[in-house]
Amino acid sequence: MNALPTPPDIVRCAYMDLVVTDLAASRAFYVDVLGLVVTEESETEVYLRTFEEFIHHNLVLRQGPVAAVAALAFRVRTPEDVDRAQAYYEALGCRTERRASGFVRGVGDSVRVEDPLGFPYEFFYEVDHVERLAWRYDLHNPGALVRLDHFNQVTPDVPRGLAYLEALGFRVTEDIEDSDGIVYAAWLRRKDTVHDTALTGGNGPRVHHIAFATHEKHNIIHICDKLGALRLSDRIERGPGRHGVSNAFYLYLLDPDGHRVEIYTQDYYTGDPDNPVVKWDVHDNQRRDWWGNPVVPSWYTEASLVLDLDGNVKAVEVREEPTELAVTVGADGFSYTREGDAEKGFKLGNTL
Ligand SMILES: [Fe+2]
């Protein structure tokens, strides 16, 4: 195998460039309901950030014809790492596009790539700094979103994706597999949390969700209460609950276009070089929800399309290996609550 150039030193997931079909409806969801902070906006774009963020934005809402993800953007450690990113992807044979003045407002010299899995990744260092509103409790709402935590991507071949992302410098923290060696999902980090992105096995390239962090569990409960009060409970797809994987408290919402947003809090520190990898059995009922609550089928099957660098929707490839839904839910599926259980172990009341 030919040696690849040094990969860019990626600091963290930084923002998502998201195409929405009704900008006013999406703005109402992300700003009026979820309380993200508007850094700036125009007729066609809204730039949003979390309360602890000091770079220009964590989410761009962009009016467009098809709901899709235009870029998953990562901050790199130095300006030279943007050069490294471009050289690295060119060596991989991927299409790249460099723009010295950036692809979006508030971000300078950047490179966008169509990566080997078909995802549009962006790498940047230069950025406009804005006020970090961490101490501005006069502005916080009870469900305050304080940080961008991670992305989650759907790809047909998880081991192939892992090999690519580990070579790029990501480290695996957890995965879901079975005794035949099939990998259903994996979590990968650059910053010292459980992940900056995750790979979910399924038809892809698609984006499963973007996740924002709150400080505490009660902030997530408030978001649920608020959605109920607004008669928007149908935006709640799954949760609230406690994950097995990542140990985080979670809630999954769907925005007006069906883009999935996770609200996430209290995973654990992963920064040591010998951080242990946690492996979950796909048949363990507590892997996705520590309390054993079932996962709704839409959570397994639905995800956002992604765009290529010309703005066209990327074709979706079908996963050939068994899906997590197929092996854990339904007539042929099997899950257990206690190791050694011989019968399907979903909670009484499960109707899936
Ligand atoms: Fe997540």
Image (spheres, rainbow, N blue to C red):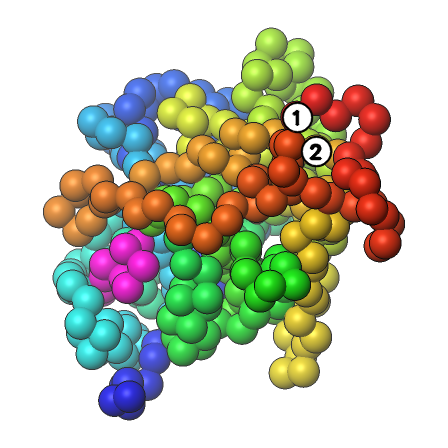
The percent coordinates of residue 148 (x first, y second) are: 52, 50
Q: Position of residue 173 (x, y in %)?
A: 62, 67
Q: Which residue is mark 1?
A: 352
Query: In this orientation, does residue 57 appear?
Result: no
Q: Amino acid at mark 2?
A: Pro
Q: Quadrant of residue 140?
A: top right
Q: Marks 1 and 2: in contact by CB < 8 Å?
A: yes
The correct choice, above or below, for 243 with respect to 114 in the image is above
Name the one closer to the observer, 74 or 145.
Answer: 74
Compute the Cα span from label 2 to label 1. Answer: 8 Å
Secondary structure under tag 2 reads: loop
Image height check: is 10 above or below 42?
A: below
Q: Which amino acid, by three-letter code, is at mark 1?
A: Leu
**Residue for badge 2:** 294
Callout 2 crowding tier (Cα within 10 Å): few <14, some 14–19, many ≥20: some
**Residue positioned 38% across, 19% down in the render:** 25
Residue 116 inside the magenta-drawn segment: yes
**Region in magenta:** 108-119
The N terminus lies in which quarter of the figure?
bottom left
Q: Quadrant of residue 224?
A: top right
The C terminus is located in which quarter?
A: top right
Q: Position of residue 96 (x, y in %)?
A: 17, 64
Viewer-side label of 2, 1: 1
**Residue 298: which disc?**
none
Crowding at mark 1 (Cα within 10 Å: few <14, some 14-19, many 20+): few
- Is 41 in the magenta? no
In this rendering, position of residue 23 left or right of residue 178: left
